């Protein structure tokens, strides 16, 4: 075939701690892909628009108190409710650039240190969700992140929590994982991100099927 349309879109995920630059880099990558004629869309989790997302939003803003296990399952359900749309977009050839996903889900809950809610328990509800083709982990020390302004007012935006989350992310590294030094300039991070994204797109053009968590 002479068509250059990929068989399916790529699932490119951004993960990382507070102020690592996910918003900056995910928006920039989508613009870059559009400029190359790639059908791409930016998704963000939690998706605060849905009914479940509104419950999560109220929790993150400290307006409601929810049991730690229950809120973990809400974050997961917020991904499950998007699963069909995600698979449909990928198979229609649309590349999804996603800001946070199941790795954040597991890392943040496990970092709370609640008895029983260990990493294995935290990963279980997301099992069999579509897996990313590439996970771009924007790595930054709390010290470097601190230079980007103070912590926000949401529930997890505290130094101790962020340090614990970084340790959990470390344990979640898998074959999709690409760690990028996020303390570099925006342009230097962009260059690394584009290189990783290009390779992910090529692997999908070569027929890599959609993968599933946590295989
Ligand atoms: N959470 C969870 O518990 N369970 C789950 O399943 C999921 C999430 C999915 C909300 O996430 C919270 O939900 C989050 C995890 C938890 N809690 N925390 N922390 P969110 O994604 O909505 O919120 P966020 O992680 O706090 O994102 P953010 O505040 O939007 O940060 P960011 O996107 O990583 O950073 P940014 O806005 O691109 O950059 C921050 C600043 O640094 C900004 O001023 C930039 O201009 C600047 N910047 C960016 N790049 C650079 C470079 N390279 N150099 C210098 N300055 C830079």
Image (spheres, rainbow, N blue to C red):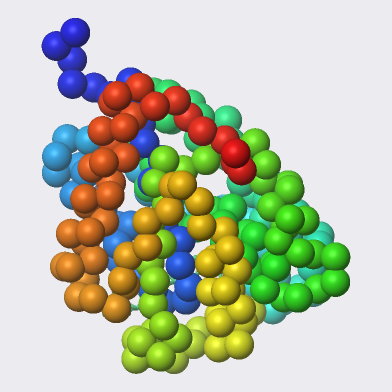
Quarter-of-image position of residue 24: bottom left
On screen, residue 48 above or below 68: above
Q: Quadrant of ligand 1?
A: bottom left
Q: In screen coordinates, is 118 left or right of 172?
A: right
Q: Quadrant of the N terminus?
A: top left
In percent of the image, x 35 and y 43: which residue is there? 41
| Residue projecting furthest to the top | 1
Q: Residue 208 appears at what percent x and percent y? A: 39, 27
In percent of the image, x 61 and y 78: which residue is there? 164
Q: In screen coordinates, is 70 left or right of 111?
A: right
Q: Is residue 110 visible?
A: yes
Foreground residue, 192 or 51?
192
Foreground residue, 101 or 61?
101
Q: Residue 210 appears at what percent x and percent y? A: 48, 29
Q: Residue 148 appears at what percent x and percent y? A: 34, 86
Q: In screen coordinates, is 53 left or right of 180?
A: right
Q: In screen coordinates, is 184 left or right of 173?
A: left
Q: Residue 155 appears at what percent x and percent y? A: 64, 79
Quarter-of-image position of residue 117: bottom right
Q: Quadrant of the C terminus?
A: top right
């Amino acid at each position: 075939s002479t068509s250059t349309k990929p068989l399916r879109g790529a699932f490119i995920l951004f993960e990382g701690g507070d102020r690592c630059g996910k918003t900056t880099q995910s928006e920039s990558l989508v613009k870059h892909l559009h400029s190359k004629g790639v059908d791409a869309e930016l998704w963000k989790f939690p998706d605060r628009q849905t009914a479940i997302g509104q419950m999560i939003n109220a929790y993150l803003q400290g307006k409601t108190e929810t049991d730690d296990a229950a809120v973990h399952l809400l974050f997961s359900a917020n991904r499950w409710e998007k699963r069909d749309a995600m698979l449909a977009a990928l198979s229609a050839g649309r590349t999804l650039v996603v800001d946070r996903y199941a790795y954040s889900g597991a890392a943040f809950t496990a970092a709370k240190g609640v008895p029983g809610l260990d990493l294995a328990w935290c990963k279980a509800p997301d099992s069999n969700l579509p897996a990313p083709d590439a996970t771009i982990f924007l790595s930054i020390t709390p010290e470097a992140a601190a230079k980007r302004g103070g912590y926000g007012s949401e529930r997890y935006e505290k130094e101790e929590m962020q340090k614990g989350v970084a340790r959990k992310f470390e344990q979640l590294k898998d074959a999709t994982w690409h760690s990028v030094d996020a303390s570099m300039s925006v342009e230097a991070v962009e260059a690394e991100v584009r290189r990783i994204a290009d390779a992910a797109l090529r692997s999908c053009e070569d027929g890599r099927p959609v993968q599933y968590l946590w295989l």
